[in-house]
Image (cartoon, grey):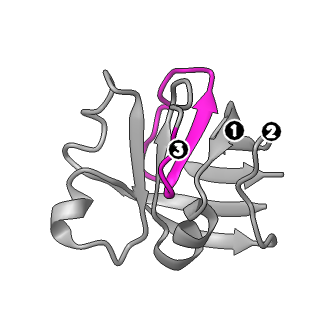
Amino acid sequence: MYKSIVKEIGALALSFEEEKIVILFGPQAPQELKEVAVIHEFEEDSSDEPIKVGGILQVDDQQFTITAVGSAANNNLKELGHISIYFSEPAEQVLPGAVFASPYELPKFKDGSVIEFKG
């Protein structure tokens, strides 16, 4: 399981609603990235690969099923707190830092939201 807490929501972070993409970044993100990202701080990590196909992404009380995971997503999450989550059908080629989840609707984020990845 991986658990983090939302610390800041960039001014443009939720402007990707039409594309159904959320960008997560850790607190060390450069300022220009903070504007487009949901900044979260790691709280608990008890798994080598917390993001798995068939696993659960939970944001507060909203649950999503992971449908595809890029080859670098787990490492990027652990090292930088960074992944891009697409709430859409996976493309033929999944980008290394991408995670796809369904249902295809953006979660509601707020300061203090709890983000969890469960195997």
- Tell me which numbered mark, 3 or 2, is placed earlier along the sequence: 2
Q: Nearer the viewer, residue 23 or 14?
A: 23
Give the vertical position of 30 relative to 70 (above or below): below
Question: Does the magenta-highlighted stretch encompass residue 99?
Answer: yes
- Which picture quadrant has residue 16? top left
The CA span between labels 3 and 2 is: 16 Å
Name the residue beneath numbered marker 3: 94
Apparent side of residue 59 relative to residue 93 in the rendered image (left or right): right
Point out the tag, 1 or 3, that comes first from the N-terminus: 1
Q: Earlier in the sequence, mark 2 or mark 1?
A: 2
Name the amino acid type tagged 2: Gly
Q: Nearer the viewer, mark 3 or mark 2?
A: 3
Q: Looking at the picture, how far across and down is residue 100, in whole percent?
A: 58, 37
Q: Position of residue 70 (x, y in %)?
A: 58, 53
Question: Disc 2 designates what residue?
Answer: 54
Answer whether labels 2 and 1 touch (C-beta < 8 Å): yes
Q: Residue furthest left?
A: 32
The spot of residue 47 in percent (x, y) is 80, 70
Q: Look at 76% across and 43% down and name the residue there.
A: 53
User: Which residue range is magenta in the image?
Assistant: 93-111
Query: Quadrant location of the N terminus?
Result: bottom right
Residue 50, by quadrant, is bottom right
- The majority secondary structure of the magenta stretch comes to loop
Residue 102 part of the magenta-drawn span: yes
Q: Which residue is the site of mark 1?
A: 66
Q: What residue is drawn where x is 73% and y is 72%?
A: 45
Q: Is residue 19 left or right of residue 31?
A: right
In what element is the residue under mark 3? loop
Q: Secondary structure at mark 1?
A: strand
* 1 vs 3, front mark: 3
